[in-house]
Amino acid sequence: MDQLVPALILLGVFLGILALMYLGWRGRGARQADLPAPDLDEPLETLDGGVEAGPFEAVYVSTVLADKPFERVVAHGLGTRSRAHLSRGTGGSWRIEREGAPSFTIHGDRVLDIAAAPGMAGKVVGGDGLLVIRWQHGPDSTALDTGLRLTSRADHDLLLRKEHTS
């Protein structure tokens, strides 16, 4: 009985911390609601006419504000790390099919750059282990970086080569 009160206090502190984390996550999502939302249900077959490369197995790491690799975007379901399949359309669009989170498409005309990076919010791998797609909806909207860790290094290198030779 002597240990019940301290255990209850510890449990209350733990639950309070979890509640604050949840409120912080929701608050960040509300502050980022004006950021561009990706297109959720547009397959590459209708958008680009077909798939040029993929699907490749990957882990969707996160989407962050461009040039701020630790400023995670949680609005529009972009904050959820998940297993994914990545495909590139013949017109330069990218489709990210995520497990347990909304899948989305980034139109080719919205892609600003494809590069490799050592990490971003949610994953730091060093070297150039992440494939990063920089995109934005229009010239006046905020640029975003979407990072993926491909299962195969050969696939990662292939997508980078394809982008830089296109």
Image (spheres, helix red, strand yellow):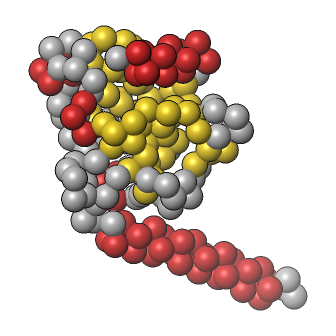
x%, y% of residue 23? Answer: 45, 75
x%, y% of residue 48? Answer: 17, 20
Q: What residue appears at the point 48 percent right and 37 percent down from the top-left corner?
A: 132
- Quarter of the picture containing the C terminus is top left
Residue 7 vs 41, above or below: the answer is below
- Quarter of the picture containing the N terminus is bottom right
- 161 or 107, which is in the foreground? 161
Q: Does the image show residue 45? A: yes
Residue projecting furthest to the left: 46
Q: What residue appears at the point 24 percent right and 15 percent down from the top-left corner?
A: 90
Instruction: Using residue 53 as the reference point, say whether residue 22 is left or right of it.
Output: right
Q: What residue appears at the point 34 percent right and 52 percent down from the top-left corner?
A: 143
Residue 4 vs 159, above or below: the answer is below
Residue 29 vs 5, above or below: the answer is above
Instruction: Using residue 98 as the reference point, say whether residue 3 is left or right of it.
Output: right
Residue projecting furthest to the right: 2
Q: What residue appears at the point 65 percent right and 82 percent down from the top-left corner?
A: 12
Q: Does the image show residue 59? A: no
- 44 or 8, which is in the foreground? 44
Q: Where is residue 70, by image quadrant?
A: bottom right
Q: Where is residue 135, by image quadrant?
A: top left
x%, y% of residue 63? Answer: 44, 48
Residue projecting furthest to the front: 165
x%, y% of residue 159? Answer: 46, 19
How many numbered discs sit on the rendered protein? Answer: 0
